[in-house]
Amino acid sequence: MSRKVKCPCSSNADLRLAVAWLMVVCVAAVLLIWKLPQTTVSANILDMLPRAEHAAFPQQQYLQRLEGQVIFAVRGQEAVEPFYEALTSDEAVAHVSGQCDQKCRQQWAEALLESRATLLSSEQIKQLEDAKAYSRKVLAQLYSPVSAVSKQELQKDPLLLMRGIIRQQSAVSLNLNGDWLTAKDQSGQPWTLLFVRLKDGLTNDQQHRWVTKINQQIAQTQEAHSAQIVYQGVIFYSDYAAQTAKHDLTLLGSLSCAALLFLLWWAFRSFKPLLFCLISISVGLICGLCACLMIFGSLHALTLVMCVSLIGVSTDYCTYYIVNRQENCEKESSWQTMLTLRPSLLHALFSTVIAYGIMIIAPFPGLQELAVFAAVGLLASCMTVLLWIPILAGSIKKHSVPMVSVFERYLDLWRNKTITAKLIIVVLVLFSVVGFSKLHIDDGLKALQNAPVQLLTHEKVIASLLNRDFSQQWLVVSAGDENQLLEKVGKIRAIVKNTEQNSHLLQYLPQINSVAVQRDAIEKAGIAYETVKKRLASVGATVSERLSLKPLGLTEFLSNPIGEPYQQLFLHDQDKWYYLMPFDGSQTLTQAFHEAGVDVVTVNRRAQIESVLQTYRVNIGWLLSVAYILIVLTYARRFGIRSAVSAALSLLLALAGALAVLGWLGLPMNLFSLFALILVIGIGIDYQVFFNRISRKDAVTLFALLVAALSTLLSLGILVFSSTAVVRNFGLVLSVGVLIAFLTAPISLLTAYEKHS
Amino acid sequence: MFRRTLLSVLMALFPLSQALATEPLTVAVENQLEQVRRMAADFRQVKSSADQSLSLKSEGKLLVARNQGVLWQQTKPFEQSIRISDTTMTMQVEDDPVEVIKADSGSVIFSFVSVLKGVFEGNFKQLTDYFNVEADGSVTDSWKIRLIPKVSPFDQAFKAIVLEGKNSVDTIQLSEKNGDLTKIELFNKRLNKDVSESEMSVLKQR
C-alpha cells in the first residue's frame, strides 16, 4: 500500500555528525547517571528567588538557624511525656528543651547565680550605691513573711540580687509546671511547650521522613490521650511545598505523558514516529538535566515541574518533521525533506533560544535553571531531529493528514479573507481589551504559594501562647564588639520600657550588661556588702567575708542555661556582632531609637522578597518588549516586512490574550505570568516560521502545528491543575497564549491574498 | 432481694458517709472564716532556719479586710510595712521609698504573694486549686487546717501551711521544703465591727 523509500544518506559528513552527536549524548547520559544520585532537590519557593544578602546582617546564616527550629505546644498533661520521649529518640532531632527536672532546676539556679552581674538591672545597680538603704532592704526581706529567704540563699547570694533579677523578668509568660515549661492561652488552658532543634544539613528526604513521622506521632498521641498538639516551624512549610511539587510532578507528569502518547498515536497512526518523538524528547531531557546539574549542582522541584511541560515544546520539531515526511515520503528522500525543513527548524530554534536567553539574565536561580534546561534541552532535541531522525526515518509509513478538509476549511477562512477570519481577530482584540481592563497586578508572596490552613492555625496558637511574631520582620542592630552592642540594646530597652503599648517587645530585650557595666556594678556591690554584712551580723546571720561576684562575657552568658533562650537574638559573624529582634516596624519607635543615637535597621523579609519580585517583573516586562522587537526584526529580515507585520500581530494577540485571561478570571498578574509570556513568544514565532516557510501544502503545516500546539497544551495546560498557585498561573497564561498563537497562525494569509489580488 | 437492695443502698451511701466525715469541717471552718470580714490583730513572728542557727523575731500589727487586702505593719526590730492587694504589693522599709510589685500575668513572685494573702484572710477556698486541704478538730472548739501544696511552684517551696484557730485564725505556720519554719501568732484580735472604719481606711490608701 505505501511505498517505502530507502535512506540514501546525503553524505558521509552527515553520518559523521550523527555519530559525533551520539557520543555527546552518551557523555551527557554518563554524567547524568553519575551526578543524579548526589543531587538535592530543593522545594522552597524562596530558593527560586535571588539569594540576596541583606546589607545590614548576614541573613542567610540567620535564616538557616531559623530553619532548624520547631516549636510544639501540647494541651493535655498525659500526652506530654510520651510525646517528649518520641521527639528525643528521633535521630533527626539535635535537642529538645522544655523539660526541666530537679537537676535541671539546680543547673538553672547555678547559672543564674553565675550570671548575676550580667543580669542586674540598672535600678538594682543604682540601689547598691546607697549601702545603708540597701542593707535595710536585705534585712526587710529577711523578716518579711512573704519573702522566704532561706539561709542557703543568704550564704550564696547575701545581697539577694537573684530575687531582684527574677522580679524584673516576671513579664515572661512561660512558667514551669512540674517539670515542664508551660504557657496559658486566652481561655486560661495550659499548654506545654517543647522547643526542638533539628540537626544541621538534613536532606529533603530526611526532612520529609521526620515530618511524616511527627504527624503520625501527633495523631497517635492525640488519640491515645485525647490531647491537642500544635506546631510551628519553617520545615513544615518547606516540606508541604516539596510534597505538593512532588505530587504535581508525578501526577501531572504521568497524565501529560499519557495524553501526549495518545495524541502522537492519533496524529501518526504508526509506532515509528512515536519512537522518534520519544528519542528526541529523551535526548532533550538528558542533555537539559545534565547541563543544569553541571552548572548549578542542584535542582529545584518547581523547575522539574515546569520542565515536564517543556516536553511538549520539544516534540514540536519532531512532529513538524514527521508530518512533512509522512506526506512526502514517496517523492523525496528523508534527507531532502530535512533539507527543505532545516532553515525553518533552525530559525524556530534560534527564536526560542532568544526567548529563553532572557530568562538566564534574570538572577533567579530557579528560573535560570529552567532557562538552561529548556535552552539546552530544546537545542538537543532539535539536533536529534536534524542529525538522527533523517537516518531513522528513511522508511516511514505514508500516512495522510487526518481531517484534511477541516484544516482546509479553516485555512480558507483566512485565504478568502472572510468576515469570520476578521471576526476572530476582532473577538480576540475585544477579549484582550476587556480582560486588560480587569487585570490587576500582585507581587505578594501569598499569590505565589498558598500555605495550608492547618499550618497557619497552628502557628497562630503558638504565636499567641508565646506572644511571638513569626512574620520574619526584624529590627537589626550591629556593633564592632559585644560591649557596644549591649550598650545599644540597653538604650532600645529603655525606650521600649517607657512606651506602654510595646511591652510585648520586652521579652526580646533582656537586661544583659556589658562587661564594663558589670565591673562597675561589682565594685558598688562590694562597697554595699561591707554594710550589709554588719547589719546581718547584728541579727545573728553570718555570711562569707568576701562577696563572690564575677563579670561574665556575652558569649559565656549565651552558652549557659539562663542565656541560652536569648541565643537566637544574637549573631556573631566575622568581626561583627548583631542583635535581631522580631519587630513589626513601628515608625515612632524606630524614630525614637534613631534619636537616641542607636542606628537600627528594620528588615522585612516578606517586603524584601516582594520588592525583588516587583523589580524583576518590571525589568522582565522591558526585556519581553526587547525580545518581541528582536524576534520580529529577525523575522522581517527573513520573510519580509509584510509577513513580519502579520506575525507581529499574531504574537501580540497571543500575548495580550494570555494576560487578558488572568483579568477575566480575576487572577493576579505577576512575574511568573511574564515568564509564561516569554515562552508564548518563543512558541508563537515557531508557528509563524513553520507556517510561512512552507508554501507547498498549508493544510499539512497547519496539521503539524495543531499536533505541536496540542502537545504543548496537553503538557502545559495540565499545569493549570497544579496545587501551587504560581504554577497554575504560569500554565494558564501559557495555554491561552499558545492556543491563540495556533488559531492566528494563518494570519499572514490575509495579507498574502491582498498582495495577490 | 431485700438484702441485695440494702446492700446497694449501703454501698451507695458508703462514699457519701466517708465524705460526710471530712467535708463538713473544712466547709464549716470556711464558712466560719467567711464571717470574718475585717480583722485587726497584733502579731509575733519567728522565722527560724532549719539548723536553728538563725532565729528572727519580729512584732507588729496585722490588718485584714477580706477581699480587699492585707496590711502587715512590722514595728520591731525595725519598721516595715507590706500592703498586699489583688493587683499589687507595696513595701516600705522605715522611710525609704516605697517599692511596688505589680501582678503581671503569670508572675511567679506574685502567685506566692497571693497565696499568702489568701492565708492571712483565712480564705483557703481560693487556694484549693493549688493545695489539698485537710481539717482536724471541731468547728465549735479549736480547729486545724493543713494546706498541702499539689502543684508547682508551691510544691517546691512549701511542705505545708498550717492554720490553727477558733472563730478566727490564731496561728499560721509556713513550713518550707528546706526545713525553714515561719511561725506567726495573732493576738489582741478585734473582728468585724470592732474594727473602726478609720482603721480600715489605711488599707485603702494606694
Image (spheres, rainbow, N blue to C red):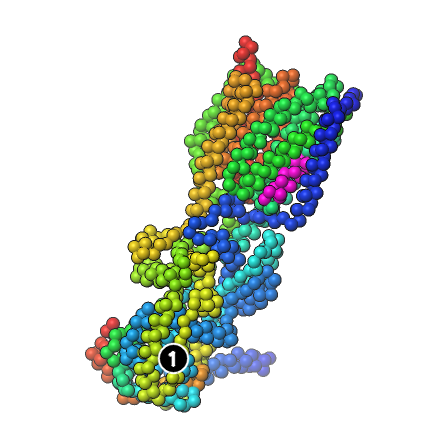
Q: Is residue A523 above or below residue A582?
A: below
Q: Position of residue A386 (x, y in %)?
A: 68, 28
Where is B157 relative to A710, above or below?
below
Residue in front for this viewpoint, B137 or A374: A374
The answer to whether residue A285 is left or right of residue A94 is right
**Res A307 → quadrant:** top right
Q: What kind of element bears circle 1?
A: loop
Q: Is residue B84 above or below residue A238?
A: below
- Categorize mark 1 by other alpha carbons within 10 Å: few (<14), some (14-19), many (20+): many
- Residue A320 appears in view: yes
Q: Is residue A278 magenta?
A: no
Whether residue B61 is visible here, answered yes or no, is no
Q: What span is in magenta? A: A281-296
Measuring from the top left, give residue A642's x and y in whole percent. Answer: 52, 17
Residue at (50% x, 47% y) in the render: A51
Q: Is residue B117 left or right of residue A198?
A: left
> Does the magenta segment cover residue A291?
yes
User: What residue is pinned by disc 1?
Assistant: A547
Residue placed most toward the observer, A227 or A543: A543
Q: Residue at x 54, y 11 (%)?
A: A755
Report in which chain the residue with disc 1 lies. A
Residue A259 position, x and y percent, is 65, 35
Residue at 62% across, 23% down: A344
Query: Residue A137: image x %, image y %?
Result: 31, 79
Q: Amino acid at mark 1?
A: Leu
* Outermost left residue: B198
Task: Place residue A737 in its image quadrant.
Answer: top right
